[in-house]
């Protein structure tokens, strides 16, 4: 199946997924294999795991290269498309080695863009709503430049992703690389790690364990949560659309919830004795976040189809399957 046409070639070669062993990456690899592609996953296993790729272990069209994107990409890797998802996304994980996080976005993205230039491959960058920082404009449109603290503890991620976007558009303008930039808003679903530290995994795992649900601050800050299958569909459409979109494209679910509301939903769905506890809000924690997805709707014909009440039960089942046998899983 030839799905990612490039300027140099019209034959199907292969698709490189950097960060393919992670939460989103492994779901993307599975989707691409199901679509008939040949997929090469490149990952340093910082937050990814071989278990995430277990379903692909015997798939002849799938291969894994264990390496860091900060190291040079093997020059002979002939691919027609590169998805760059390499970068830890959870605040505790990306703050554990902030210099490496920044280098992953800057040096790693440059390596992959150079590879695309060499091979005439199309490129998709997994950017983030974090480039809007603590936004002064709501909901966030792609034209908003953001409100980011460049020196705070989140900066290694936010500013790294902003620099990666800069590189993308310089390679598009100056070197003719066909780049697409997805600004991803909070995404959840099966394959998130229980120790990930983000809100959905924390609340669900705490409820399953009967532990207190930790809410940072007063819980009135908002986020918009997109189910993983919707996000993967957005990636694939963004990469396959013929015309290069004019700038980055927000991908996310516009449904906006406070963290208190999310905790209530989890407590409704999981049989548990857990109660909420309030803890201090981390520094630079954004107060509100909701995507304006009109560009994605117009350019990709995409909008999410899974409301949070439908996405949470399979997510709870996933976490429950990690801690107890599937038949014991209980959500109301
Ligand atoms: P994840 O941590 O599960 O996946 C990231 C993957 O990248 C992991 O497999 C990790 O081992 C790998 N990786 C990290 N640094 C690397 C390096 N230097 N070299 C090679 N591999 C490296 O995170 P995720 O939630 O799947 O996110 C995937 C991408 O999407 C990330 O780039 C993230 O910034 C972006 N994103 C995710 C969300 C979300 O809500 N999940 C939101 C916005 C943006
Ligand atoms: N959060 C929380 N309790 C947790 C984990 C996170 O209240 O156990 C809050 C966090 O402070 C933030 C929101 O939930 O306001 C979303 O956090 P997450 O780390 O999932 O994503 P991000 O802040 O990067 O959007």
Image: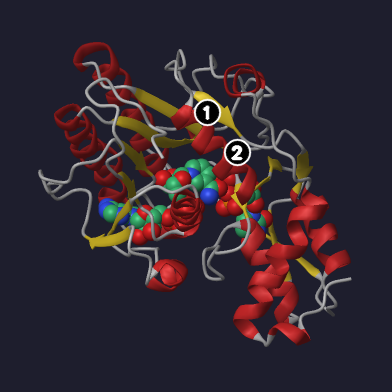
What's the residue at 84%, 80% (across, down)?
A: 273
Mark 2 Cβ inside 8 Å of ligand 2:
yes
182 or 138: nearer the viewer: 182
Q: Nearer the viewer, residue 212 or 5?
A: 5
Left or right: 274 with respect to 182? right
The mark closer to the camera, 1 or 2, is 1
Reply above or below: 317 against 13: below
Q: Residues within 10 Å of mark 1 (few under 14, many from 20)?
A: many
Helix, strand or loop for disc 2: loop
Which residue is at 48% across, 56% downward? Answer: 30
Whether pointer 1 and pointer 2 mark residues with C-beta atoms closer than 8 Å, the reply is: yes
Count of picture labels:
2
Question: How far across and how far down the image is residue 134, in percent?
Answer: 57, 32
| Residue beneath disc 2 | 286
Visible in this render: residue 68?
yes
**Left or right: residue 211 compared with residue 143:** right
Nearest to N terminus: mark 1 or mark 2: 1
Query: Relative to residue 292, is residue 112 depicted above or below?
Result: below
Q: Secondary structure at mark 1?
A: helix
Which corner quadrant of the image does residue 26 belong to?
bottom left
Q: Position of residue 284 (x, y in %)?
A: 53, 41
Q: What residue sits right under mark 1 in the picture?
A: 132
Quick one: label 2, few (<14), some, or many (20+) residues within 10 Å? Answer: some
**Residue drawn at point x = 25 percent, y = 40 percent:** 79
**Would you say the beta carbon of the disc 1 residue lies within 8 angstroms of ligand 2?**
no
Q: Is residue 153 visible?
A: no
Q: Quadrant of the N terminus?
A: top left
Q: Residue at x 61, y 50 (%)?
A: 228
Question: How far, Cα to Cα, is label 1 from label 2?
Answer: 9 Å
């Amino acid at each position: 199946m030839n799905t990612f046409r490039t300027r140099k070639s019209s034959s199907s070669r292969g698709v490189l997924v950097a960060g393919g062993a992670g939460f989103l990456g492994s779901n993307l690899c599975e989707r691409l294999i199901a679509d008939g592609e040949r997929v090469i996953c490149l990952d340093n296993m910082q937050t990814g795991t071989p278990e995430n790729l277990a379903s692909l272990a015997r798939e002849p069209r799938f291969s894994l290269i264990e390496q860091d994107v900060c190291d040079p990409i093997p020059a002979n890797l002939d691919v027609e498309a590169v998805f760059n998802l390499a970068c830890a996304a959870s605040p505790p994980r990306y703050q554990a080695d902030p210099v490496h996080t920044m280098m992953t976005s800057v040096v790693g993205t440059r390596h992959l863009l150079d590879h695309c230039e060499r091979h005439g491959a199309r490129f998709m960058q997994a950017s983030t709503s974090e480039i809007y920082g603590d936004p002064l404009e709501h909901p966030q449109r792609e034209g908003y430049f953001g409100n980011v603290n460049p020196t705070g503890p989140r900066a290694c991620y936010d500013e790294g992703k902003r620099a990666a976007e800069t590189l993308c558009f310089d390679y598009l303008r100056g070197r003719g690389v066909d780049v697409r930039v997805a600004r991803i808003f909070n995404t959840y679903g099966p394959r998130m790690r229980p120790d990930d530290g983000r809100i959905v995994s924390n609340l669900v795992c705490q409820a399953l364990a009967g532990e207190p649900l930790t809410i940072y601050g007063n819980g009135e800050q908002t986020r918009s949560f997109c189910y993983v299958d919707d996000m993967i569909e957005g990636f694939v459409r963004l990469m396959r659309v013929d015309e290069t979109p004019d700038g980055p494209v927000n991908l996310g679910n516009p449904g906006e919830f406070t963290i208190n509301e999310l905790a209530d939903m989890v407590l409704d769905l999981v049989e548990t004795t857990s109660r909420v506890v309030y803890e201090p809000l981390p520094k630079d924690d954004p107060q509100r976040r909701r995507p304006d997805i009109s560009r994605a709707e117009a350019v990709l014909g995409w909008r999410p189809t899974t409301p949070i009440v439908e996405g949470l039960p399979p997510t709870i089942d996933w976490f429950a399957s990690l801690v107890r046998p599937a038949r014991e899983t209980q959500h109301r």
